[in-house]
Protein backbone atom coordinates (compact mmCIF):
# COMPACT_ATOMS: atom_id res chain seq x y z
CA UNK A 1 0.00 0.00 0.00
CA UNK A 2 1.43 3.37 -1.04
CA UNK A 3 -0.60 6.15 0.53
CA UNK A 4 1.59 8.86 -1.00
CA UNK A 5 0.00 7.82 -4.30
CA UNK A 6 -3.12 10.03 -4.55
CA UNK A 7 -5.13 7.38 -6.41
CA UNK A 8 -4.42 4.75 -3.74
CA UNK A 9 -5.23 7.20 -0.96
CA UNK A 10 -8.49 8.18 -2.66
CA UNK A 11 -9.41 4.51 -3.06
CA UNK A 12 -8.92 3.87 0.68
CA UNK A 13 -10.89 6.99 1.59
CA UNK A 14 -13.77 6.00 -0.69
CA UNK A 15 -13.73 2.39 0.51
CA UNK A 16 -14.39 3.55 4.06
CA UNK A 17 -16.78 6.36 3.13
CA UNK A 18 -14.58 8.90 4.87
CA UNK A 19 -15.15 12.64 4.44
CA UNK A 20 -12.76 15.36 5.57
CA UNK A 21 -13.70 17.52 8.56
CA UNK A 22 -12.40 21.03 7.97
CA UNK A 23 -12.60 22.02 11.65
CA UNK A 24 -10.10 19.26 12.53
CA UNK A 25 -7.51 20.61 10.10
CA UNK A 26 -7.27 17.35 8.16
CA UNK A 27 -4.69 17.50 5.37
CA UNK A 28 -3.13 14.15 4.43
CA UNK A 29 0.50 14.11 3.27
CA UNK A 30 0.97 12.69 -0.26
CA UNK A 31 4.59 13.65 -0.96
CA UNK A 32 7.03 10.76 -0.49
CA UNK A 33 10.08 13.02 -0.50
CA UNK A 34 8.70 15.07 2.41
CA UNK A 35 7.69 11.86 4.19
CA UNK A 36 11.26 10.55 3.97
CA UNK A 37 12.66 13.86 5.24
CA UNK A 38 10.35 13.73 8.27
CA UNK A 39 11.52 10.22 9.17
CA UNK A 40 15.18 11.09 8.61
CA UNK A 41 14.86 14.37 10.51
CA UNK A 42 13.18 12.71 13.47
CA UNK A 43 16.09 10.33 14.09
CA UNK A 44 13.61 7.51 14.73
CA UNK A 45 15.30 4.09 14.68
CA UNK A 46 15.08 0.63 16.16
CA UNK A 47 15.00 0.76 19.93
CA UNK A 48 12.84 3.89 19.82
CA UNK A 49 9.17 4.57 20.37
CA UNK A 50 7.26 6.97 18.14
CA UNK A 51 4.24 8.95 19.32
CA UNK A 52 2.12 10.45 16.56
CA UNK A 53 -0.71 12.97 16.92
CA UNK A 54 -3.34 13.09 14.20
CA UNK A 55 -2.29 10.14 11.99
CA UNK A 56 -4.94 10.87 9.35
CA UNK A 57 -4.95 7.96 6.89
CA UNK A 58 -1.75 6.50 8.34
CA UNK A 59 0.78 7.64 5.73
CA UNK A 60 3.36 8.73 8.32
CA UNK A 61 2.24 6.09 10.83
CA UNK A 62 3.24 3.29 8.46
CA UNK A 63 6.77 4.69 8.14
CA UNK A 64 7.04 5.15 11.90
CA UNK A 65 6.00 1.54 12.46
CA UNK A 66 8.55 0.39 9.86
CA UNK A 67 11.40 2.34 11.46
CA UNK A 68 10.70 2.34 15.22
CA UNK A 69 10.24 -0.50 17.68
CA UNK A 70 6.74 0.72 18.48
CA UNK A 71 4.40 3.44 17.21
CA UNK A 72 1.37 4.84 19.01
CA UNK A 73 -0.97 7.27 17.22
CA UNK A 74 -3.60 9.45 18.90
CA UNK A 75 -6.52 10.24 16.60
CA UNK A 76 -9.54 12.32 17.65
CA UNK A 77 -11.76 11.50 14.64
CA UNK A 78 -13.57 8.21 15.24
CA UNK A 79 -14.44 8.03 11.53
CA UNK A 80 -10.74 7.40 10.81
CA UNK A 81 -10.35 4.42 13.15
CA UNK A 82 -11.65 1.74 10.70
CA UNK A 83 -9.65 3.34 7.89
CA UNK A 84 -6.48 3.20 10.01
CA UNK A 85 -7.18 -0.43 10.91
CA UNK A 86 -7.07 -1.11 7.18
CA UNK A 87 -3.96 0.93 6.27
CA UNK A 88 -1.97 -0.30 9.28
CA UNK A 89 -3.09 -3.94 9.17
CA UNK A 90 0.31 -5.31 8.09
CA UNK A 91 2.06 -3.92 11.21
CA UNK A 92 1.89 -5.56 14.63
CA UNK A 93 3.87 -2.85 16.45
CA UNK A 94 1.43 0.03 16.04
CA UNK A 95 -1.53 1.09 18.18
CA UNK A 96 -4.17 3.73 17.47
CA UNK A 97 -5.88 5.49 20.37
CA UNK A 98 -9.16 7.27 19.64
CA UNK A 99 -8.82 10.25 21.99
CA UNK A 100 -8.37 14.02 22.07
CA UNK A 101 -4.65 14.58 22.70
CA UNK A 102 -5.48 17.66 24.78
CA UNK A 103 -7.33 15.44 27.26
CA UNK A 104 -4.85 12.54 27.42
CA UNK A 105 -2.50 12.01 30.37
CA UNK A 106 0.58 11.82 28.16
CA UNK A 107 3.03 10.94 30.92
CA UNK A 108 0.97 7.90 31.93
CA UNK A 109 0.39 6.91 28.30
CA UNK A 110 4.12 7.00 27.48
CA UNK A 111 5.01 5.00 30.60
CA UNK A 112 2.34 2.40 29.79
CA UNK A 113 2.97 2.04 26.05
CA UNK A 114 6.72 2.54 25.75
CA UNK A 115 8.21 1.57 29.10
CA UNK A 116 11.89 2.58 29.27
CA UNK A 117 12.54 3.10 25.55
CA UNK A 118 13.35 6.63 24.32
CA UNK A 119 10.33 8.29 22.72
CA UNK A 120 10.06 10.91 19.97
CA UNK A 121 6.94 12.76 18.88
CA UNK A 122 6.57 12.76 15.09
CA UNK A 123 3.43 14.34 13.66
CA UNK A 124 1.69 16.43 11.04
CA UNK A 125 -0.07 18.66 13.57
CA UNK A 126 -3.46 20.28 13.02
CA UNK A 127 -2.71 24.01 12.67
CA UNK A 128 -5.44 25.12 15.07
CA UNK A 129 -3.85 23.43 18.11
CA UNK A 130 -0.16 23.41 17.16
CA UNK A 131 1.08 25.73 19.91
CA UNK A 132 -1.04 24.27 22.77
CA UNK A 133 0.13 20.75 21.88
CA UNK A 134 3.83 21.63 21.69
CA UNK A 135 3.80 23.80 24.82
CA UNK A 136 1.81 21.14 26.65
CA UNK A 137 4.62 18.64 26.06
CA UNK A 138 7.34 21.11 27.07
CA UNK A 139 5.75 22.83 30.08
CA UNK A 140 4.46 19.58 31.56
CA UNK A 141 7.86 17.91 31.08
CA UNK A 142 6.37 14.99 29.16
CA UNK A 143 9.29 12.52 28.79
CA UNK A 144 10.07 12.72 25.07
CA UNK A 145 13.49 13.26 23.50
CA UNK A 146 12.30 15.37 20.60
CA UNK A 147 9.32 16.63 18.63
CA UNK A 148 9.56 16.55 14.84
CA UNK A 149 6.39 18.18 13.60
CA UNK A 150 4.84 19.59 10.45
CA UNK A 151 3.41 23.00 11.28
CA UNK A 152 2.42 26.24 9.59
CA UNK A 153 5.44 28.02 8.10
CA UNK A 154 4.87 31.26 10.01
CA UNK A 155 4.71 29.42 13.34
CA UNK A 156 7.94 27.54 12.60
CA UNK A 157 9.67 30.80 11.70
CA UNK A 158 8.62 32.29 15.04
CA UNK A 159 10.00 29.29 16.90
CA UNK A 160 13.52 29.68 15.48
CA UNK A 161 13.57 33.52 15.43
CA UNK A 162 16.35 35.47 17.18
CA UNK A 163 15.94 38.61 19.32
CA UNK A 164 15.46 41.76 17.28
CA UNK A 165 13.66 40.18 14.34
CA UNK A 166 10.03 40.71 13.42
CA UNK A 167 9.21 37.02 14.05
CA UNK A 168 10.74 36.96 17.53
CA UNK A 169 8.21 36.83 20.35
CA UNK A 170 6.92 34.97 23.39
CA UNK A 171 6.67 31.68 21.44
CA UNK A 172 10.30 31.99 20.31
CA UNK A 173 11.46 32.45 23.90
CA UNK A 174 9.34 29.60 25.24
CA UNK A 175 10.42 27.06 22.61
CA UNK A 176 14.08 28.05 22.88
CA UNK A 177 13.96 27.84 26.70
CA UNK A 178 13.10 24.14 26.52
CA UNK A 179 14.50 22.95 23.17
CA UNK A 180 17.02 23.34 20.37
CA UNK A 181 14.82 24.09 17.33
CA UNK A 182 15.97 23.26 13.80
CA UNK A 183 14.09 23.61 10.51
CA UNK A 184 14.05 20.33 8.53
CA UNK A 185 12.23 21.10 5.28
CA UNK A 186 9.37 23.02 3.69
CA UNK A 187 6.20 21.47 2.27
CA UNK A 188 4.08 23.35 -0.26
CA UNK A 189 0.28 23.04 -0.32
CA UNK A 190 0.36 20.56 -3.25
CA UNK A 191 2.07 18.03 -0.95
CA UNK A 192 -1.26 17.43 0.81
CA UNK A 193 -4.78 16.21 0.14
CA UNK A 194 -6.80 18.37 0.38
CA UNK A 195 -4.42 21.27 -0.16
CA UNK A 196 -4.09 23.75 2.73
CA UNK A 197 -4.03 27.46 1.91
CA UNK A 198 -0.54 28.03 3.33
CA UNK A 199 2.90 26.42 3.17
CA UNK A 200 4.06 24.13 5.95
CA UNK A 201 7.44 23.49 7.52
CA UNK A 202 8.84 20.46 9.33
CA UNK A 203 10.69 21.52 12.48
CA UNK A 204 12.62 19.34 14.92
CA UNK A 205 12.63 20.42 18.57
CA UNK A 206 15.39 18.59 20.43
CA UNK A 207 14.35 18.69 24.09
CA UNK A 208 17.17 19.96 26.30
CA UNK A 209 18.13 17.92 29.37
CA UNK A 210 17.66 21.08 31.41
CA UNK A 211 16.27 24.49 30.36
CA UNK A 212 18.67 26.68 28.39
CA UNK A 213 19.08 29.19 31.21
CA UNK A 214 18.67 29.16 34.98
CA UNK A 215 15.80 31.21 36.39
CA UNK A 216 14.26 31.12 39.86
CA UNK A 217 10.63 31.00 38.70
CA UNK A 218 10.04 30.08 35.03
CA UNK A 219 6.31 30.75 35.37
CA UNK A 220 6.94 34.33 36.49
CA UNK A 221 9.58 34.82 33.77
CA UNK A 222 7.08 33.80 31.11
CA UNK A 223 4.53 36.20 32.60
CA UNK A 224 7.17 38.93 32.16
CA UNK A 225 7.89 37.77 28.59
CA UNK A 226 4.19 37.62 27.73
CA UNK A 227 3.82 41.14 29.12
CA UNK A 228 6.77 42.43 27.10
CA UNK A 229 5.30 41.11 23.85
CA UNK A 230 1.64 41.80 24.64
CA UNK A 231 1.89 45.20 22.98
CA UNK A 232 5.03 45.11 20.87
CA UNK A 233 5.14 48.84 20.13
CA UNK A 234 5.28 49.82 23.79
CA UNK A 235 8.56 50.36 25.58
CA UNK A 236 9.51 47.61 28.01
CA UNK A 237 8.74 49.70 31.09
CA UNK A 238 5.27 50.64 29.80
CA UNK A 239 4.48 47.10 28.65
CA UNK A 240 5.42 45.63 32.03
CA UNK A 241 3.80 48.32 34.18
CA UNK A 242 0.46 48.04 32.36
CA UNK A 243 0.47 44.26 32.05
CA UNK A 244 -2.51 42.16 33.16
CA UNK A 245 -0.10 39.27 33.87
CA UNK A 246 2.10 40.87 36.54
CA UNK A 247 1.15 43.44 39.17
CA UNK A 248 4.28 45.52 39.74
CA UNK A 249 4.54 49.29 39.85
CA UNK A 250 6.34 51.35 37.24
CA UNK A 251 8.89 52.81 39.68
CA UNK A 252 10.08 49.37 40.77
CA UNK A 253 10.29 48.20 37.16
CA UNK A 254 12.46 51.21 36.25
CA UNK A 255 14.62 50.61 39.34
CA UNK A 256 15.20 46.96 38.37
CA UNK A 257 15.93 47.69 34.70
CA UNK A 258 18.40 50.42 35.58
CA UNK A 259 20.10 48.17 38.16
CA UNK A 260 20.61 45.63 35.37
CA UNK A 261 21.88 48.24 32.92
CA UNK A 262 18.85 47.80 30.65
CA UNK A 263 17.30 50.88 29.03
CA UNK A 264 13.66 51.11 30.28
CA UNK A 265 12.69 52.48 26.86
CA UNK A 266 13.95 49.42 24.97
CA UNK A 267 11.32 47.14 23.44
CA UNK A 268 10.93 43.54 24.58
CA UNK A 269 11.76 42.14 21.15
CA UNK A 270 15.39 43.26 21.61
CA UNK A 271 15.94 41.08 24.70
CA UNK A 272 17.00 37.44 24.83
CA UNK A 273 16.20 34.77 27.39
CA UNK A 274 19.15 35.66 29.59
CA UNK A 275 17.98 39.26 30.00
CA UNK A 276 14.40 38.18 30.68
CA UNK A 277 15.64 35.76 33.35
CA UNK A 278 17.65 38.49 35.09
CA UNK A 279 14.71 40.90 34.94
CA UNK A 280 12.24 38.39 36.35
CA UNK A 281 14.60 37.21 39.13
CA UNK A 282 15.36 40.75 40.33
CA UNK A 283 11.77 41.97 39.93
CA UNK A 284 10.48 39.12 42.03
CA UNK A 285 13.20 39.54 44.63
CA UNK A 286 12.69 43.29 45.10
CA UNK A 287 8.89 43.05 44.88
CA UNK A 288 8.89 40.46 47.69
CA UNK A 289 11.19 42.66 49.80
CA UNK A 290 8.80 45.60 49.73
Image (tube, helix red, strand yellow):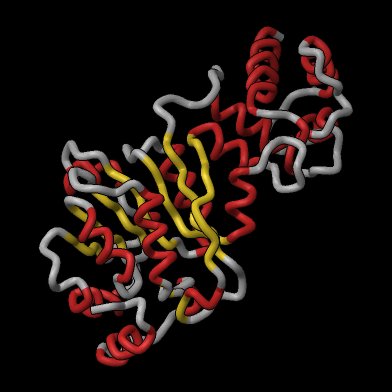
For residue 36, side relative to residue 193 (left or right): left
Residue at horizontal 54 percent and vertical 26 percent from the top: 218
| Relative image position of residue 208 (x, y in whole percent) | 43, 31
For residue 22, side relative to residue 262 (left or right): left
Does 32 appear above or below 212?
Answer: below
| Relative image position of residue 138 (x, y in whole percent) | 44, 39
Q: Quadrant of residue 244?
A: top right
| Relative image position of residue 108 (x, y in whole percent) | 24, 43
Using the image as rendered, state which of residue 6 and residue 135 is in the foreground.
6
| Relative image position of residue 269 (x, y in whole percent) | 76, 37
Does 26 appear above or below 230?
Answer: below
Specify whether residue 110 is in view. yes
Q: Residue furthest top?
A: 289
For residue 214, side relative to residue 167 (left or right): left
Q: Residue furthest right?
A: 265
Specify whether residue 109 is in view. no
Using the image as rendered, state which of residue 89 and residue 229 is in the foreground.
89
Residue at horizontal 46 percent and vertical 43 percent from the top: 205
Q: Quadrant of residue 88?
A: bottom left
Q: Quadrant of the N terminus?
A: bottom left
Residue at horizontal 77 percent and vertical 32 percent from the top: 270
Q: Quadrant of residue 53?
A: bottom left
For residue 216, side relative to residue 68 (left or right): right
Q: How many marks?
A: 0
Using the image as rendered, state which of residue 172 and residue 30 is in the foreground.
30
Residue at horizontal 60 percent and vertical 27 percent from the top: 220
Q: Quadrant of the C terminus?
A: top right
Does 12 appear above or below 74?
Answer: below
Amino acid sequence: MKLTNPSELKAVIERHGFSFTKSLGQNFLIDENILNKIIEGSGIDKGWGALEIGPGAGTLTRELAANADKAVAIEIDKKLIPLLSDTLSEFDNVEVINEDVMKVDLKSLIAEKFGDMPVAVVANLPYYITTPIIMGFLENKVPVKSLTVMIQKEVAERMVASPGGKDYGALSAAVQFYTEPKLVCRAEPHCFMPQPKVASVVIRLEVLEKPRIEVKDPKFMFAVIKSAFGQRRKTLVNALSKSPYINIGKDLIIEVLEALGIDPNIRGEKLGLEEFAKISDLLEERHNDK
